[in-house]
Amino acid sequence: MHAFQAWLGRDPRRPPALALLALCGLCGLAFFNGIGDLGLIDKTEGLFVEVPRQMLRSGDWVTPRWNGEPFFDYPVWGYWMVAISYKLFGINAWAARLPAALAATATVLALFALVLVLAPAEESQGSRVGRALLCGTLLTLSPGWVGWGRSSVTDMFLASAISLALLGFALAWGAADATPQRRIGHGALALFCGIAVLAKGPVGLLLPGVVIIAFLLLKGRLWAEVQRTPWPPLLALFLGVTAPWYALATAANGTTFLNRFLGFSNVERFTSVLYSHPGPPWFYLPWLVVLLLPWSLFLPVAALRLRFWRREAWRQQTSAAADLPLLALLWLVLIVAFFSSAATKLPGYILPAMPGGALLVGLLFRPWPSEEARPLGAGLRWSGWINTVLLALISIAAVLAPRWIGGDPSFPGFADAIAASPLPLLLAVPAGLAAVALVLLLRRSSAAPQLLSRLWLPNAVAFAAVVTLLLPALNPLFDRERLLPVRELAQLAGREATTSEPLLVVGYRRYSVVFYSGRSVRFVTSPREAIDLLKAAPAAEAAGSVLLLGSDPELLEFGIGPGDAVLLARRDSHRLVRLPLTTLNQLAQP
């Protein structure tokens, strides 16, 4: 160990380089490990990845299309990234998820770099690197960041862009005018606000703007910062990123684009419930706990330790490093509050708040030198005990889970496959060992309070073990038991259907069928709905029949029992059948 420390000390570039390498390795395990072993997950991912496939097929990179029609729910940044990945690596699940994994990794590395750069120069290099590595580790090992970093949906593209914009502002804040640090920070702010607007729309500019304005108001520096900001180049960069596509999309699609994207996908999504996703005002509080677990258990202590209600204390701060916890708190609270006020609610909407929460907790465990004299106190100890109890409960639940998993008639073998696998133990053992380690730390912390600053370590080791061992085992099992049947039937439908023969998915909207079949699909729940949809496609009548894909319970509810249609294939409890149009019309009769 002494020889290793001596080796590190010979060159000041070695500690940060080694920490960066370790963080990259952790990102590899969290975001890239086995991302191609799992088929597309319905509904959202199955829909999202099809749009870039149709971009490549049509050569039209301006108008997003899905299922044969223009699709303006989201702008194009995520589609472009996935389409480029398809171009380079082929059209497959791994290539579809690669851009989201890279976006998640970029945010982690940028957070590491910012905390390292802002650390006081008089602080030891080990402390600076350790704090930066800790903050990056906490974000990497947050369940929300791992989950969406391994999924090809628009949420990670928006979250990473907003986060990188706010990290750019933090870099520029406090730096002298015309310095490289301020230029780089402002450039990142403008660039990534533009990318965020290309990823999700006006919210990509609104959210960073709200956080920054609130921060400057609390600091009493809003007008001063407005005056010293070089607006012309920043606006030119922002508009250079955003304006071309919006102008081209408007020119190509006119009011259809404006009404669908700005009116429906932005205004209506905020003011009314879309796609049956309502939620009470407190909807995101439990989700915040889950998506940042276990670090979310320490958020109350981190926020109270800041004494954020003492406005004069914040106005007396003179360094960007000392202001970073306040920015992180506003980052977390305001983004969650914004989406809590919206009518449509989904867990992934608050993903942009996750880096702010991870940063806040990281600075709790490894504060700046000016704050180290303040004791961590009883609040952190209580949070540690809650953390311990939760880990113990997770360990027990993992062991008992196979007995609790109910049978799903659509996937009858899934519960038995879980019970026969090592998955319960791969979760129970790391969680249980982490709980024991926390008990030891907390008991010893009465005599040595500095041990409280290490409460993150057992959690990090346990979560790293889970993503390293459990995910590679879970993905193939989940894919085989729940995704493979539909995927194989969709691929068969693409080969078996005649040119004009409609393909109908019955019941649950399995959007991945569009991707895997390579053809347009109609999603129906009843024969009457199917007939109404087919009336809009006169060519379907020429085929004389339709293909239907669904599970046995869904097809039975639709009116098709065993032997009522020509069975083309069966995979577990799912069937692909051919049904004459005359029979479909008979089923649609009241």
Image (cartoon, helix red, strand yellow):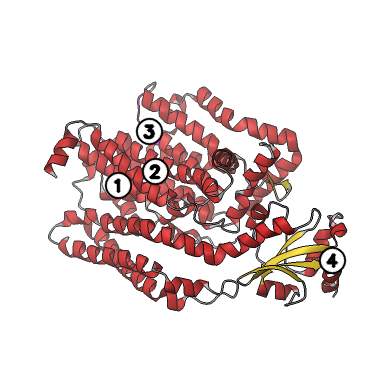
Answer few, some or many: residues within 10 Å of disc 4's Cα (few below 14, many 20 plus, some between 14 and 19): some
Q: Quadrant of residue 435?
A: bottom left
Measure how far apart labels 3 and 4 are at the Cα level: 64 Å
Q: In this view, does 449 lie above or below 406?
A: above
Q: Which marked residue is nearer to the observer: mark 1 or mark 3?
A: 1
Residue type at tag 3: Leu
Which is more toward the observer, 422 or 386? 422
Q: Mark 2 points at which residue?
A: 108
Q: Which residue is drawn at 71% across and 76% down?
A: 556
Q: How far across and down, in percent of the image, does residue 297 sit?
A: 34, 60
- The dot on residue 581 is 4
Residue type at tag 4: Leu
Q: How far across and down, in percent of the image, does residue 497 sit?
A: 76, 58
Which is more toward the observer, 139 or 258? 139
**Quarter placement of the N terminus:** top left
Q: In this view, does 531 lie to the left or right of 274?
A: right
Q: Give the range drawn in magenta.
A: 169-176
Measure how far apart labels 4 and 1 are at the Cα level: 62 Å
Answer few, some or many: residues within 10 Å of disc 3's Cα (few below 14, many 20 plus, some between 14 and 19): many
* Secondary-structure class at tag 1: helix
Q: Which marked residue is nearer to the observer: mark 4 or mark 1?
A: 4
* Secondary-structure class at tag 3: helix
- The dot on residue 134 is 1
Measure how far apart labels 2 and 4 are at the Cα level: 54 Å
Q: Mark 3 points at which residue?
A: 171
Q: How far across and down, in percent of the image, does residue 35 sit?
A: 48, 52
